[in-house]
Image (cartoon, rainbow, N blue to C red):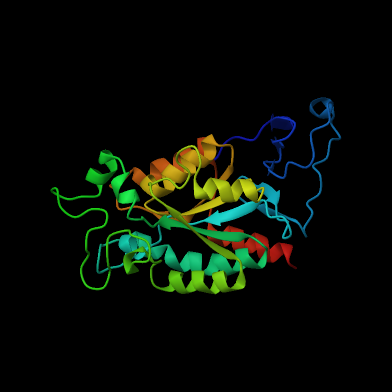
Amino acid sequence: MSRPHVSTPTEYGNAASFWVEYPTGLVDLTRQTHLPTDAKSRDDFQVPPIQSSTQLEIPVDKVRFDDVTSFPYHEFIPPCRISFFLHPDLRDHPTGLDCVLPLMKAVPALRSHGIKILWVNWGLTGHELHTIPPSLVRGFMKNGRGGFGSHLPGSFGRMLMRGEFNSDLYGPLQHLYEEGKKAGTDVWIHKNRMSGLWGYQSALDLYLKENGINTLFFAGVNADQCVLGTLADAYFRGYDCITLKDGIATTSPAGGLENVLYNAVNGYGFVTDTQRVVEAIEKSQQ
């Protein structure tokens, strides 16, 4: 699923927001160094050296992006890791549970490099129950029963409502979030659609813009629903999108996950995995 390398250095975008791609395979997302006007005709043109204290170089087809602790340009976004989608007492999602351990390893490494962790999850209010469109309401019901705000078995509470147990992160991920919240590295953002970036103005989009963030890592479930919704909207808005293939999963039939990964490589941005990200961070800290 790899894209071919460019034959000459190529710049994309505009004066304020741009990428530079090199024949080596490196795609520089830092928006720091424009190509000189004669770059394509020079045989001696050199790729700018990496600034190991402020940048990461991650094998994807090699991507470089800013990592400035005092002014973060990037975030890690795991949409929909809540108990409603992962807890075995509510649904059978073994591939989703397989993503938990990679995230448990990746999140502390990302934090150590100054990367904010944004937990973007369903969390409806009573008012929103009256404003959600019928297509979405019907999609979350079965045979006309249940749906948003309905009572789930046991202590799980009302379906996808704020403050309910089923809207907490699944098991160890909730503890991971609380650890990060206490340390000031993690932020919880509620959403009321599959996409966390839908509409004219969302809480997630406001946070990203207010903090000058351009580059996003994506993980979560389901890959072809909540993750794809947020990923596609992020791409449409001009964010740099990097999908972690061992951090996403779906309950959809064969082809659902593959379609997301195919388009993440060939359209939306880049694909890598948590191991490569952790190794890049460890290398930068040596």
**Residue 213, can we see it?**
no
Residue nearest the viewer, comparing 214 with 155: 155
Q: How many marks?
A: 0
From the top left corner, tell me how far across and down residue 46 is, in percent. 83, 40
Residue at screen point 78% across, 42% down? 32
From the top left corner, tell me how far across and down residue 83 is, in percent. 34, 65
Does 211 appear above or below 167?
above
Quadrant of res 158: bottom left
Residue at screen point 32% across, 44% down? 131
Question: In the current view of this chain or complex, which residue is farthest to the front?
Answer: 127
- Judge left or right: residue 262 versus residue 272: left
Residue nearest the viewer, comparing 196 with 216: 196
Residue at screen point 26% across, 73% down? 155
Question: In the current view of this chain or complex, which residue is farthest to the left?
Answer: 143
Quadrant of res 38: top right
From the top left corner, tell me how far across and down residue 286 is, in percent. 75, 68
- Judge left or right: residue 80 versus residue 148: right
- Judge left or right: residue 102 versus residue 140: right
Residue at screen point 36% across, 52% down? 222
**Residue 183, can we see it?**
yes
Does 233 appear above or below 107?
above
